[in-house]
Amino acid sequence: MTQLQIHNPATGAMIAELRCDDDASVAAKTAAARAAQRAWQLVPMADKLAMVQRFRAMLSAELENLATTLTQEVGKPIAQSRNELNGLLPRIDFFLEQAEAAVRDQHVFDDAGMHEQIGHIPLGVVANISAWNYPYFVGCNVILPALLTGNTVLYKPSEYATLSGLHITRLLHASGVPANVLQCLVGAGAVGTALTQQRIDGVFFTGSHGTGARIAAQVAPRMIKLQLELGGKDPSYVRADADPRAAAESLADGAMYNTGQSCCSVERIYVHAAVYDAFVSHFLAAVEALRMGDPMDPATSVGALTRAPQLDLLQAQVDEALALGATLRCGGHRLPGPGNWFEPTVLTEVDHRMALMREESFGPIIGIQKVGSDDEAVALMNDSRYGLTAGIYSRDEARSRELLDQVNAGSVYWNCCDRVSPRLPWSGQGDSGIGLTLSTAGIQTFTRPKAWHLRQP
């Protein structure tokens, strides 16, 4: 078996070396998950809920250790690692509160001796190929509802967040989930490919559009459940009646939080000419107040990029935008020395000729474009192959609702951004993916409906 080396993206230092799975171990783990599935399905819901409740308690008790590991392997500022773990707790509470009702049999007709009902049957063996930017959120959005609804799970965390993935697996095993019911697979893309080739009943992937498209092509002939949470080029529009300072402070956080490495990070901003100058001034002040530095320092708000290749992509987007007439207002450069560092960067005088305004950046850079009307803003917001989130800042709720109704996005925001709720479905349009997690629909997505026709003799 090959070895997976894990490096601290802030320093470049190797922090762990793990033995990878191979084709044989992936096949063996899949067979074990298949053999364990029926018995797990028959475990009473109350017992499954108790295990997840114990997992929640252990997660809370180990929070500081888990946050430290997360920061060391992905470069996320320690305060934000703690936020992710603390933010996971109410998501777990949602699953605990809603899982049983979400999969309860529905009795829909009873007349003249004929009874009809809808059952919710586990998919079976589920593959979860997860992401590195929010390993606890993204991983548990799949693992927990999948387990609660009676599936066994083959979990491949990103190679950039494997230590956190192993922690999730360890804590769930300690909470009572049998080893063959949840299994962690260690490795990079080859392990993911081996997993998708197994006899499984569902693939749930979070990551890039390119990888998602390859997975879709691999599994399409087998007619199994496929769910893809992919990228975004998430726009926000600041209307003429908005408070430019409040909008700027909110959007600066939405663009730069987690060093811009969120699928729902604000990636392009359109501002009405009436408030453009004031907005840009306040936005620059908010970005310049951010502290970039050691991710283990609680005062740090911008950390290292997790993946070194992203540095080249960001620099290329900045250089192209400048060559096409954009104005650099701050940042614009990768930093020398060990680790993966790129300055928080703001460009104005941008347009849709530039990759900065069309293609996912996934880093601490943002373009701000002036517009002259609501219609122009909506047209630009929809000028994208992505459709994950979009937002509008305005004092007029009715007008904002009218405009957001025209925007192609799975989630829309009024006077907020970069927000996820366990009560609402998380989904995308276009190249942002297919399927959903979260909400009661995100629990039911791990089941298939079974129609019962029951006639009294």
Image: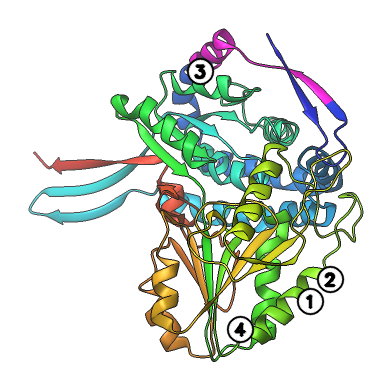
Range covered by the magenta-colored residues:
16-31
- Marks 2/4: CA–CA distance: 20 Å
Q: Name the secondary structure under disc 3.
A: helix
Instruction: Give the residue at mark 4.
Output: 276
Labels 1 and 3: the sequence-earlier one: 3
Magenta segment: does it hold 29? yes
Q: Quadrant of the C terminus?
A: top left
The answer to whether marks 2 and 3 mark residues whose Cβ atoms lie closer than 8 Å is no
Front residue (pair 393, 164)? 393
Instruction: Give the residue at mark 3.
Output: 194
Q: Amino acid at mark 4?
A: Tyr
* Nearest-to-viewer mark from 4 and 1: 4
Q: Amino acid at mark 3?
A: Ala
Instruction: Give the residue at mark 1.
Output: 285
Relative to 374, say whether 309 is above or below: above
- Marks 1/3: CA–CA distance: 48 Å
